[in-house]
Image (cartoon, helix red, strand yellow):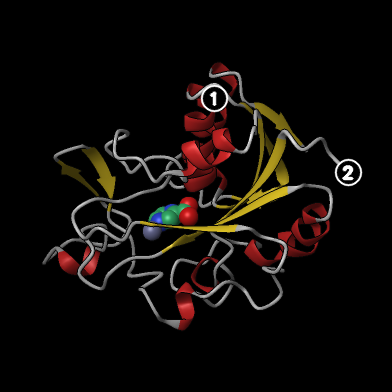
Amino acid sequence: MRPATDALIVIDVQNDFCPGGALAVAGGDEIISRINGLMGDFTTVVLTQDWHPANHASFAANHPGAAPFSLTTMPYGPQVLWPTHCVQGTTGADFHKDLRTDPAQLVIRKGFRSEIDSYSAFFENDRTTATGLEGYLKNRGVTSVTLVGLATDYCVAYSALDAARLGFKATVLEGACRAINLNGSLADAQAQMRAAGVALEA
Ligand code: VGL
Ligand code: ZN
């Protein structure tokens, strides 16, 4: 058992990010058994769930003529336009059926405001609108977070970078993550995480 000051944060292990899903990450389902095992080692377990309204601004389908995976500019900066995914209440937004959810004390839903995307478990993509997770963890005396899930180079990396910025010791278990890897995004994310002091472990 890890000390009670360590929390496990499981990012977006949802059907749409697993093989067969709308924004499938290669091998996304391969990490589930390891994550299930890790849950038993942590006192605090948090799950995140990407949770978009159908009219979400991050969906290419809501930008006439825009191709999925193209880049646009939002008021808060560059934004990839994704295939429609994790729409609230759909099967695609459900956690993968094999993921244990009972050990989690908190589920953070993110990306529910139509005008702003939210990769990180801590802040939306403007990097200032808080989800509340910082307060939850600090109130419970958590000082260290271990991050796993999907996708390494987007929601996991953004969460890890924010965790480090907020003063948590942050570790990403890369073997319990899988990446989208769009135009070198995985190498970029790894470099940014290293520079921010995030520990990358197997
Ligand atoms: C994610 C793209 C869009 C992720 C979520 O979970 O990494 N990526 N929405
Ligand atoms: Zn999303």
* Percent of width and height locating residue 4: 76, 38
Residue 159: percent from left, percent from top: 50, 39
Whether 155 is drawn above or below 202: the answer is below
Residue at the disc numbered 1: 164
Q: Which mark is residue 99?
A: none
- Ligand 1 within 8 Å, label 2 CB: no
Q: Ligand 1: which quarter?
A: bottom left
Q: Residue furthest front?
A: 139
Q: Residue furthest left?
A: 64
The residue that mark 2 highlights is 1
Earlier residue among tags 1 and 2: 2
Q: Residue at x 65, y 50 (%)?
A: 177
Residue drawn at (49%, 61%) of the image: 49
Task: State the separation of the CA atoms marked 1 and 2.
Answer: 23 Å
Report if the beta carbon of the residue with label 1 is closer than 8 angstroms to ligand 1. Answer: no
| x then y, percent, for residue 164 | 54, 25
Residue 176 picture location, percent across and down: 72, 50
Along the viewing direction, whichever of 172 and 27 lies nearer the viewer: 172
| In this picture, residue 7 sits left or right of residue 137 | right
Q: Is residue 187 left or right of residue 33?
A: left
Question: SS class of the residue under badge 1?
Answer: helix
Amino acid type, callout 1? Ala
Q: Is residue 39 left or right of residue 48?
A: right
Is 193 located above or below residue 117 in the figure? above
Closest to the observer, 126 or 30: 126
Three-letter amino acid code of the residue under disc 2: Met
* SS at mark 2 in the image: loop
